[in-house]
Image: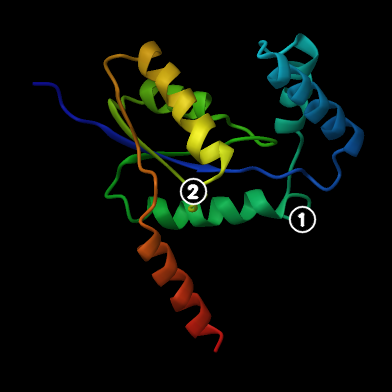
Amino acid sequence: MATVVRGVILVGHGGIPKDCPQELVTRLKRLEAQRRAVKMLPTSEEIELDTKIRRWPRTAETEPYQAGLETVAARLRAQLDGALFAVAYNEFCAPRLEESVAELIKQGANEITVTTTMFTPGGSHSEIEIPEILEQLRKQYPKVLLRYAWPFDLNLVASTLAEQIKRFS
C-alpha cells in the first residue's frame, strides 16, 4: 500500500497591486468578458495580460491582500501537522491553483485538500471556477486524490464572526 503524502492548498481571491497600470486590468477584464460570452478559450493577448498582472512585483505596501493571505497561510500551515502546503489565487496573483497542485505533486503529495478564504455561497470563484479546475486536474492527475473542503458550515462561519464582534465590543 502506498504511503499517503498529504498536501493542502489555501486559495485566495487575489488582489491588484496598487502600482499596476489600471488599463492592463481593464483590458484583461474586457477580454475575459468577451471570451466568456462566446464560451471560447483565452486568446494569447488575454493569457499574456493575465500573466503580466499575476507576476507583477509585489510588496506588502503595494498588495496588502496578498500579504494578509500569506500571513493567514503561515498560521494555517503551522496547524497542519507537517502536511505539504501551498497558496494559490483565483485572479491577479500567482500562483494559479493549477500551478500549486503541480508543485505539491512534484513534492510527493498524493492526497491534496483545497480550501478557500471565500466562505459564503454564491461566489463564482468558490462555487464554479475552483470545482471546474479541480475536475480538470483530476483527469490530469488520476492517481492523486483531490478534495475540495467547501462549502463551509455557515454556523461555524457565523460563530467566528460573532467572536470577532465580541473582541471589538
Mark 2 — residue?
A: 121
Residue lying furthest bottom = 169
| Residue 88 at least partly seen | no
Q: Which mark is residue 61?
A: 1
Position of residue 152 measured from the top left corner of the image (x, y, whole percent): 39, 52
Q: Residue 46: name its quadrant.
A: top right
Amino acid type, mark 1: Glu
| Residue at the spot 76% in from the left edge and 31% down from the top edge | 53
| Residue at the spot 75% in from the left edge and 25% down from the top edge | 33
Query: 43 and 21: which one is in front?
Result: 43
| Residue at the spot 66% in from the left edge and 14% down from the top edge | 39
Q: Residue 115: name its quadrant.
A: top left
- Residue 79, above or below 8: below
- Residue 132, above or below 124: above
Q: Secondary structure at mark 1?
A: loop
Q: Residue 36: name its quadrant.
A: top right
Residue 128 lies left or right of residue 137; in this view the side is: right
For marks 2 and 1, the one nearer the N-term is: 1
Query: 58 and 120: which one is in front?
Result: 120
| Residue at the spot 80% in from the left edge and 21% down from the top edge | 31
Give the Cα distance between marks 2 and 1.
30 Å
| Residue 7 at least partly seen | yes
- Residue 153, above or below 32: below
Quadrant where the image shows the C terminus:
bottom right
Position of residue 83 measured from the top left corner of the image (x, y, whole percent): 31, 41
Label 2: few (<14), some (14–19) or many (≥20) C-alpha neighbours in 10 Å: few
Position of residue 164 measured from the top left corner of the image (x, y, whole percent): 50, 76
Residue 125 lies left or right of residue 155; in this view the side is: right
Amino acid type, mark 2: Pro
